[in-house]
Amino acid sequence: MAAASTASPPASRDVISLWLTVRLHPDAPLPSSPFSPSAPPSSSYPFFPARAVADLAECLDTPNFIPHITLLGGGFQHLSVEQITSLIEKAVGGARDEDADSAVPRRPKKVWKPFFVRVAEVESGDRPFQCIYARIRKPGEPAPSTRPSGSACGVSATPEASLASQESAKHAPEQPGIRDSPEDLFELHSTLREVLYDAFDLPYRGDNASYMPHVSLVYAETDQLSLERRATLAKLLNATAEEQETPEEAANRTLPGSKDADADLAPADTFLERFERARERFGKTIRGTFVSVSSIEVVQTSVGSCADAGRWRILASVPLCRDAFENV
């Protein structure tokens, strides 16, 4: 199973990351750039709305980028793109193991097949590359509830409401016909970390103390999008289409940190109205949607400003075995 190589090795100022690229739907081709044609203005539910990143970037005047789950970062300064690709192919069962004919008994190697993961919550952070993101459900975590953990307008829920939300999450039904496999995602992360870092006696330094898979929705510096504002926007994005407020409610509500917040009466065309129109274009619902994992991308990224995200390139793609979706 050969990987598709599409570019030359990156320049020295760039680094390598491994992505699980978000596609428009499970059988869609990889996007060639952040500016590839988007899906039509309609809901892609139950799948993650891949066009949300472009719609939010246009609304917020923030960088556009290919939506993805980072599987491994760290730079990979010790390996070439060809070496990385070859090691991934062997690890996921796409290349012949040279030791397969050995007389020494070996534990059967797992052959990785496509699987799904699911968005647990939309959250915000204090880093440019973790500004607003859709966090992926972890193993053992309850399935996403039909209600967000807090109110859509950014007001904390009461203890009674939070308890009810946690209880409903325990019994939230899965989408008929689709089952997510967060265990596979974390196992794939661990497998490739062992192959690409541990095997070379090199420490892996990810962006977080422990693996936190997520699909970033917005990249921004704090001077462009304050911590208070990004937290409020994340809670708005965490609401599903069924939980939306009326246009009149949106028109009369102001966003913390905005110039409208100091006005006695918000203008007719408020920022929040524009934000809601952006959400309307991608179908509004993010929480609880599914992301299909069918390949691993080797990507040229940059350690500089998040403004450079538009020029990141997919260098190679290693498909998982496509005989069947075992968990559909």
Image (cartoon, rainbow, N blue to C red):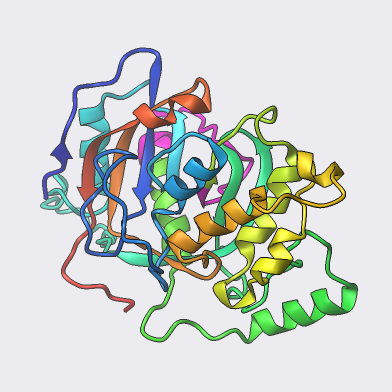
Number of disc labels: 0
Q: Which residues are magenta?
A: 195-216
Where on the picture, by quarter, is residue 313? top left
- Can you see residue 152? no
Name the residue rendered at 15%, 35% in the picture: 5
* Front residue of 172 and 86: 172
Q: Looking at the picture, does residue 52 appear above or below residue 87?
A: below
Quadrant in the picture for the C terminus: bottom left
Q: Position of residue 106 (x, y in %)?
A: 25, 57
* Front residue of 88 and 231: 231
Q: Is residue 179 left or right of residue 56?
A: left
Where on the picture, by quarter, is residue 312? top left
Q: Position of residue 49 (x, y in %)?
A: 42, 60
Q: Position of residue 169 (x, y in %)?
A: 66, 79
Q: Position of residue 203 (x, y in %)?
A: 51, 30
Name the residue rendered at 19%, 27% in the picture: 7
Could you tell me what secondary structure mostly forms the magenta stretch?
Answer: loop
* Front residue of 185 and 153: 153
- Asked if the stretch drawn in magenta spans residue 196, the answer is yes
